[in-house]
Image (cartoon, grey):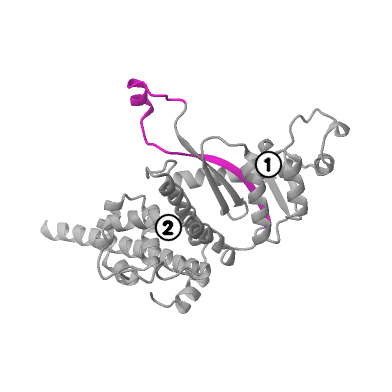
Amino acid sequence: MSSSVNYVLNTIYRRRTICMKIIISKYKKVADFCYELFRISELPLYFSKFSNKIYSNFQKLFLLVYKQFRKFTYEDLLTDIADNETLRIYLGLNKIPDYTTLIKFAKSLPMNICEKLVLAFKKIIPEPERVAIDSTGISLDNASPHYCKRIGLSVKKRPFMKTTFVVDIDHYLILLCKMRKGHRNDMKEAKPMIKKLSRHYKKIEQFYADRGYDDSEVFRLVFEWLNAYALILQRRLDVPKHRRKGEYRKFMYDIFDYGEYLQRNKIETCNSMFKKRFGSSAKSRHHKCQKIEVFLRVVAFNIDRLIRMGTEILIVFIRISRVSY
């Protein structure tokens, strides 16, 4: 009887060891991708020459990305890192930082650093040919609608952050991200994002969007800045061509392919994947930290997609060229 119990316990231990090795290996890959992104973005090792230089920017940023991967709170994150000696050695962490260190770092992190990290993926991912734009809401609280109703708070209208994504629909990778609290017209976000997209991605052939982006200026930017076809569903399809405004809107009215336009639904799939993987609400209470949190989720989401796409050769190259911080 005791021998069978020992056999079962040994089997469980071996399986647990194998699972832990797989998990640690995955997050080593995440660390390698983070290192490559920081190298491409040309981020400094320390933001100030007067820094105490106990923890580098790479270590603190990786811990924030790792926190989003595991959906941890700050306390859970540090508990996990303390138990994970292999990953701690791999990162070069001599001691565990206090959770207030990471909170202060997130609050002081410039927003342009996060934007650089998202744009750094252009050196890693395949050149996109078909992109789509859409917005989704990130809830800013985790309150239960049932208890909100019981204490007299509004249930239908909760605080949220409108997040606009530009997505490569062939590989489900987020290329650009822009956030704003509350309601805002879709065109206000689309125009600067299309201009920014044209500066960083040169081989886009088709641009998809729903009726919310039906605007003559958006059509013009897609054709003249991106040199792409604007597959945007126009409002009031019963209105004849000669009564429509805009040269490019009239042009697309003749050649619009509704079957090809349905490929736009893939960005809805990407939004769903993003929320199911990393949650649909922000845990931070400070406005800037909420935006930092969403940006880091985008970085984590893209890294997760690259790992699932099987970019092993790229990871080997990154490890060969890596210089430890």
Q: Tag 2's secondary structure?
A: loop
Q: Quadrant of the C terminus?
A: bottom left
Q: Which residue is under mark 2?
A: 109
Tell which residue pokes out farthest to the front in this image. Answer: 50
- Please state the horizontal and vertical placement of residue 70, each as a whole percent of the image: 36, 53
Is residue 282 shown above or below 304? above
Q: Is residue 163 left or right of residue 159?
A: right
User: How dense is the environment of label 2, judged by Cα within 10 Å: few (below 14), some, or many (20 and up)?
Assistant: some
Report x, y in % for residue 6.
15, 60
Residue 313 shows up from this direction? yes
Q: Position of residue 146 (x, y in %)?
A: 36, 25
Residue at x-position 64% and y-position 49%: 192
Magenta stretch containing residue 98, yes or no? no
- Amino acid carrying mark 2 in the image: Leu
Q: Amino acid at mark 1?
A: Leu
Q: Which residue is depicted at the point 39% across and 44% down?
A: 286
Magenta residues, start to end: 129-156
* Above-or-below relation of 149 to 271: above
Residue extending farthest left: 2
The dot on residue 262 is 1
At x 33%, y 65%, the residue is 21
